[in-house]
Image: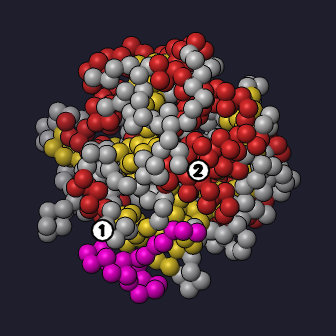
Amino acid sequence: MNLYETFTARMRDRGDADFITTREGRRYRYSDARSATARLAGALIELGVAPGDRVAVQVEKSPEAILLYLACLRVGGIYLPLNTGYTADEIRYFLSDAEPALFVCRPTALDEAREVARETGCPAVETLGTDADGSLMDTAERATPHEAIEPREDDDLAAILYTSGTTGRSKGAMLTHRNLGSNAETLKEAWRFTAEDRLIHALPIFHTHGLFVGCNVTLMAGSSMLFLPRFDADVIFEEMPHGTVLMGVPTFYTRLVQDERLTPETTANMRLFVSGSAPLTAETHQAFQARTGHAILERYGMTETNMNLSNPYDGERRAGTVGMPLPGVEYRITDRETHESVPRGEIGMLEIRGPNVFIGYWRMPEKTREELLDDGFFVTGDLAMVDEKGYVHIVGRDKDLVISGGYNVYPKEVEQVIDELEGVVESAVIGVPHPDFGEGVTAVVVPEPDAELSERQVLGHLQDRLAKYKQPKRVFFADSLPRNTMGKVQKNELRKRYQDAYR
Ligand code: MCA
Ligand code: AMP
């Protein structure tokens, strides 16, 4: 069934209750959201979006962006959100790979977007601003509202989210109506979401966490969301007395615990703090609890799978663990070669199976076969172990990946761009402890003997080529990179060498 159909039932039930509000006084009640999605659906159809077509969207956070996502589901389109930090170079790849029927961009980026669309053969470009403005909204205003909901099968695609690949090429994770619907329903139950909840929504809406975990769960429960453009501790403290739930990446919580306003009183109205997308340290978990009495609920997910494991709502939320499988989700911890389960307590590869697991990478059958096994288990690339109480610990990564402030950065992609720079022999990009972002993207560059390369030059070269969050916070120079006997760069060695770079 079309996921939008499930959401409609909740929208109808909730009538004039708030769905999304902003601090600037914008307000979409559930009834408003229904009619707005009908108008946006009418616009999409007028713009040539047919069932199965991709709609690529790179816009700032706004309630209308969520309505566009819903409208896209409604017409049977495939929503393809893109990080606002991506540069034109990065967007060119996504559009050429996904071949969307429509690209919705920021009003300020129209010229650039048109150019990229022309180069990649994307037939239509529209704009969407943060004040319910832009050409898409104008078209929606004029369009005949489209009240129907396009029938969809469970395995039809609802969204494609790109996640960077270890070889440098981003992979489009294909998520179905069933994937998103089942996970939202599960999380609503597991985290006890109800119509009384008000989510303080401070995450971006182009990734799984802010888009599906935040918005789909809200829709499933008929709750409301306060939409904030970004995380700002001052605003969070002002809003906690009026909110009930906060979902964040660990950086939210490390910033909050450093703030003297964090007390039992300022968090008294809140019933739940959720953390995910990167490891929350046990120290932050414990400090937060000591200061507020609230145990942060840590959960584990991936773009390819939505949420898999979660600490319990009732019962002990164990610091430094991601809890147990959500209902309907199976996991196993295996030997990475044989995929046989390792004995309890030992470290192995975490594999996941369930209705939440995606159906493959867009137009990459081989990559799909490597990671999605015949028996339905998905190989996460995360190393895990289960403790004596059944709580899963994520102890490391088998994949070469840095997570900075909840954003994934694949070293290979950054290294490739650095290596293009004249005077560079080779480079290695690593993540080392960073007090704010958890891991700081760090480059180690080997220059040619006579080259006079500076940190500034390297960073300048990356400026327009990579999104800001992928750019190294520091660049170090070395005469050579440590390698093992197989010739592979020993990143562990480098991580050790530069472990104090941000301390
Ligand atoms: C901003 N900057 C960053 C990051 N964010 N650099 C590295 N990593 C980042 N994450 C840059 C800014 O451009 C700026 O550069 C400088 O760092 C300081 O910015 P600041 O004002 O401190 O940043 P902010 O706006 O406060 O943002 C930090 C943030 C944000 C709140 C942690 O990055 C964020 O909202 N992250 C959430 C990411 C997320 O939603 N991940 C979910 C992925 P300059 O000063 O030079 O301009 S979904 C997922 O992973 C799975 C499915 C899951 O399990 O959830
Ligand atoms: P993404 O590809 O952006 O969806 O990021 C997924 C990755 O984030 C996972 O494979 C993990 O490495 C990491 N991740 C998500 N949640 C957690 C968590 N609670 N603890 C540790 N790592 C996490």
Residue 205 visible somewhere in the drawing: yes
Q: Position of residue 151 (x, y in %)?
A: 50, 41
Q: Which residues are magenta?
A: 327-348
Residue 315, given in percent of the width and then of the height, sits at 72, 74
Q: Earlier in the sequence, mark 2 or mark 1?
A: 2
Image quadrant of residue 353? bottom left
Residue at figure coordinates x 73%, y 32% from the top left: 31
* In-front residue for pair 69/233: 69
Near mark 1 (Cα within 10 A), the count class, few <14, some 14-19 or many ≥20, is few
- Please state which of residues 213 and 259 is positioned toward the viewer in this rendering: 213
| Place of residue 12 in the rendered image (x, y in percent of width and height, measured from the top left) | 73, 39
Indicate yes or no: mark 2 CB to ligand 1 under 8 Å.
Answer: yes
Magenta stretch holds residue 424: no
Q: Name the residue located 62 percent from the left edge and 47 percent from the top edge.
A: 6
Q: Quadrant of residue 292?
A: bottom right
Residue denoted by label 2: 213
Image point (46%, 29%), residue name: 58
- Residue hosting label 1: 374
Q: Is residue 174 above or below residue 465?
A: below
Q: Which mark is residue 220?
A: none
- 336 vs 407, nearest the viewer: 336
Q: Is residue 83 visible?
A: no
Residue drawn at x 70%, y 67% as measured from the top left = 313
In-front residue for pair 93/347: 93
Query: Going by the image, does 246 lie left or right of 339?
Result: right
